[in-house]
């Protein structure tokens, strides 16, 4: 590698060899040394010629190198860094020319020489290692001879640490020059893995500028190879045509042909083989896709997007706010069509429905797997977008509480206790006052028994006419007492009217903690495993209690929502799933009963995903950012719920004669009914019973002697009468017997 900052440059050369983890450092060193061994003689033979070439004038530069130097020296690249990568072929002089002329124009520059072994070299390595009694891993031979791709994670050296740290602190712009003639897919794959790993990539495929310096005969093949160049957004291939003696510059327009297919474009250069100032050699071709069909992988989230199996054809989304976003916005802006399908499952077939899961063998399934494998250009995945999604829960509207105890609700227990205490003290005051007036013989000489005192106090509470004392001191107390009772009764009546007309509502749980420790039963809509596994793994006492007691509803989860309407039930689910099920299945009356809790947990974001540093990323992201200021996502949600869900439901009800479901709850009336004032009737019944008991008690008390005498008299009178009749009957029987004996 050669690193240049200002005028200081450093070189580092390294080779690529793939070994298993058990390979020793000595084996790797020997193998790399042997790979480069055939080059040592060549370097030795050309050493003198290289020494002589350094004395030549710098003006003797290859035309294609001169074009690249002038292109890099343009103002557009003034804030960029420069990376030059070369393969095993000798391009050292060209690298030196470019660095010497461009190092002062760009912020910094560095070069890398990267070597990938051929099969013939592998044979020499194998024979030498056998002679040295060293074991070569068969995996090395298989990777090279069979052309199997080695992932970046398995590389012994992903990328130079110094380069990654340098890239982290450098400017955002980077110009990359590839001086390669080795266009094997294995080699380009390793270059791709080295430059664009998952973390801290050296280059970015959708932002940086790439120049491939190679032979003109390789331009067409190189620019369309998927292993590296076809994934790059800004790229050109530069070569020299020896027959026509001119510099050839080509690029690929991804979507310029009919149907959005790729087309190779040759860019103009000046007669002096220099770049033209009015030509943009790095054109962004991703604004007009020319009818290209983009494959979109989506998870099975019916609340957000629906596409019917077998997921064939274009523009095949049936409903969902993502359908509206694609058809009313993205396809109009970028001129493309789409084909949506539910993501791949474990069996490798469409219909799995997940956003992404890494299997034990390291492969991915779901939307993430479709993006990595290239089956999908775009995917709907969990991502960072302004439209937040989360777990919440829904309950029914609180029920109105009708109870005879409503007559006591205007005051709390403390207030009633205070009223009772002061009433008792007032009675005590009356008793003491009358005793003192009787003892010291002052005042009017009147005397109130306790029954009259209680009658006075209760009459003032009920605003009835009550006897007044003749004593001036007692009249002063009575006036203050009447004012006290007037304030209490006014407050009581005002609150009582409110409670009777507008009954007290039950208390709803507002947080997950209140829900967990309330008398509500809890259900959970299990849409995927992510949310449930997160709650199950939590050690928070609230979530531990919820997971232990809640009822799980797999699948659609409509049963959970129906239980909320019928019972005292709370249903935990994604907020958008609850809205979708409500609009799709519930009647208008049931819909009005639902209350969404303000509590939120397990926040997720649904966004549009692409392959890492995809050519679509920046352009699609820029256009989608315009939707935020106009709140288009919320508008699409409302439109989808009304036109594609709720309206279809109402039309079906009308056609199937289910118009009763379209009516609102008739009980939502402001008229006073019997249940509003039932407490007064309960009090009346209680008073009648108490009055009857008091009446009977009073009657028995005052008439006890007369009743007892009358009862005794009647008792003994009836007894004597019975005894007399018995005696008369016996005497008659005796007379009849005597008469019979005398006849015969």
Image (cartoon, rainbow, N blue to C red):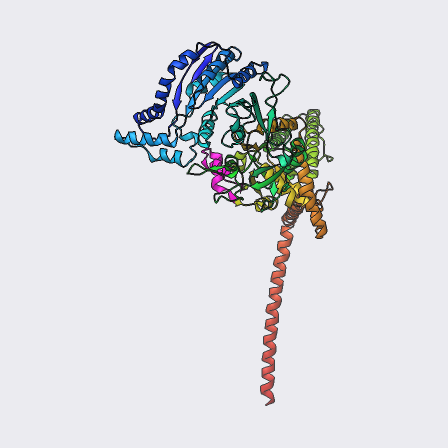
Tell me the quarter of the image containing the C terminus: bottom right
Q: Main secondary structure of the magenta part?
A: helix
Tell me the quarter of the image containing the N terminus: top left
Foreground: 574 or 169?
Answer: 169
In the image, farthest residue toward the bottom: 744
The mark tally for this picture is: 0
Q: Quadrant of residue 425?
A: top right
**Left or right: residue 711 compared with residue 372:** right
Give the magenta range. 525-552
Percent x, y of residue 617? 57, 28
Q: For residue 119: magenta?
A: no
Percent x, y of residue 491? 69, 31
Q: For residue 543: magenta?
A: yes
Foreground: 38 or 575?
Answer: 38
Q: Residue at x 59, y 79 (%)?
A: 733
Percent x, y of residue 465? 74, 35
In the displayed structure, would residue 464 be above or below residue 159?
below
Foreground: 631 or 493?
Answer: 631
């Amino acid at each position: 590698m050669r690193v240049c900052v200002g005028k200081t440059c450093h070189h580092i050369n390294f080779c690529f060899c793939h070994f298993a983890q058990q390979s020793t450092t000595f084996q790797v060193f020997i193998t790399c040394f042997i790979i480069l061994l055939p080059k040592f003689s060549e370097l030795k033979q050309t050493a003198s010629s290289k020494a002589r070439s350094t004395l030549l004038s710098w003006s003797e530069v290859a035309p294609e190198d001169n074009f690249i130097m002038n292109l890099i020296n343009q103002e557009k690249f003034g804030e960029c860094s420069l990376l030059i990568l070369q393969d095993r072929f000798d391009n050292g002089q060209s690298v030196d020319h470019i660095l010497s002329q461009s190092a002062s124009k760009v912020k910094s520059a560095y070069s890398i020489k990267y070597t990938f072994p051929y099969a013939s070299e592998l044979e020499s390595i194998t024979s030498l290692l056998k002679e040295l009694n060293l074991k070569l891993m068969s995996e090395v031979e298989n990777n090279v001879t069979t052309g199997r791709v080695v992932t970046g994670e398995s590389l012994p050296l992903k990328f130079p640490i110094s380069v990654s740290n340098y890239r982290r602190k450098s400017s955002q712009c980077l110009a990359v020059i590839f001086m390669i003639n080795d266009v094997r897919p294995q080699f380009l794959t390793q270059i791709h893995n080295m430059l664009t790993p998952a973390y801290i990539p050296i280059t970015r495929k959708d932002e940086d500028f790439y120049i491939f310096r190679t032979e003109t005969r390789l331009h067409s093949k190189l620019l369309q190879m998927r292993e590296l160049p076809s994934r790059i957004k800004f790229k050109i291939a530069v070569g020299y045509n020896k027959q026509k003696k001119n510099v050839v510059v080509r690029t690929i327009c991804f979507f310029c042909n009919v149907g959005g297919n790729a087309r190779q474009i040759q860019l103009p250069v000046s007669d002096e083989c220099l770049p033209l100032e009015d030509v943009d050699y790095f054109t962004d071709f991703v604004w007009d896709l020319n009818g290209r069909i983009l494959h979109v992988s989506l998870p099975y989230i019916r609340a957000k997007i629906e596409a019917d199996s077998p997921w064939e054809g274009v523009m095949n989304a049936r409903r969902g706010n993502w359908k509206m976003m694609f058809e009313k916005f993205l396809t109009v802006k970028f001129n493309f069509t789409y084909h949506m399908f539910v993501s791949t499952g474990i069996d490798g077939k469409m219909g799995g429905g997940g956003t992404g899961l890494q299997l034990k063998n390291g492969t991915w399934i779901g939307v993430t797997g479709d993006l990595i494998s290239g089956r999908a250009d775009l995917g709907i995945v969990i991502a960072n977008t302004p439209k937040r999604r989360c777990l919440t829960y829904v309950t029914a509207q609180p029920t109105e509480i009708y109870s005879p105890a409503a007559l006591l609700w205007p005051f709390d227990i403390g207030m009633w206790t205070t009223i009772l205490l002061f009433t008792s003290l007032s009675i005590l005051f009356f008793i003491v006052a009358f005793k003192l007036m009787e003892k010291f013989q002052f005042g009017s000489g009147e005397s109130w028994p306790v029954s009259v005192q209680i009658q006075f106090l209760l009459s003032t509470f009920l605003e009835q006419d009550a006897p007044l004392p003749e004593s001036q001191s007692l009249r002063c107390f009575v006036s203050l007492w009447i004012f006290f009772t007037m304030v209490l009764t006014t407050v009581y009546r005002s609150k009582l009217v409110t409670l009777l007309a507008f009954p007290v509502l039950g208390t709803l749980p507002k947080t997950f903690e209140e829900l967990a420790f309330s008398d509500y039963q809890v259900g959970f809509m299990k849409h995927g495993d992510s949310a449930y596994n997160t709650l199950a793994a939590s050690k928070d006492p609230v979530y531990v209690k919820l997971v232990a007691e809640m009822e799980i509803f797999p699948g659609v989860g409509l049963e959970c929502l129906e239980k909320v309407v019928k019972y005292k039930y709370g249903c935990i689910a994604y907020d958008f799933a609850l809205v979708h099920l409500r609009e799709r299945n519930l009647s208008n009356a049931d819909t009005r009963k639902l209350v969404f809790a303000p509590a939120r947990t397990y926040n997720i974001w649904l966004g549009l995903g692409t392959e890492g540093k995809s050519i679509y990323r920046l352009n699609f992201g820029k256009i989608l950012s315009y939707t935020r200021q106009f709140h288009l996502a919320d508008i699409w949600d409302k439109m989808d719920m009304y036109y594609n869900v709720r309206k279809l439901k109402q039309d079906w009800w009308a056609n199937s004669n289910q118009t009763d479901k379209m009516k609102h709850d008739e009980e939502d009336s402001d008229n006073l009914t019997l249940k509003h004032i039932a407490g007064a009737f309960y009090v009346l019944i209680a008073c009648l019973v108490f009055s009857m008991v008091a009446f009977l008690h009073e009657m028995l008390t005052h008439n006890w002697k007369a009743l007892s005498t009358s009862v005794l008299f009647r008792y003994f009178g009836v007894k004597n009468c019975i005894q007399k009749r018995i005696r008369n009957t016996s005497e008659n029987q005796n007379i009849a017997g005597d008469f019979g004996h005398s006849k015969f």
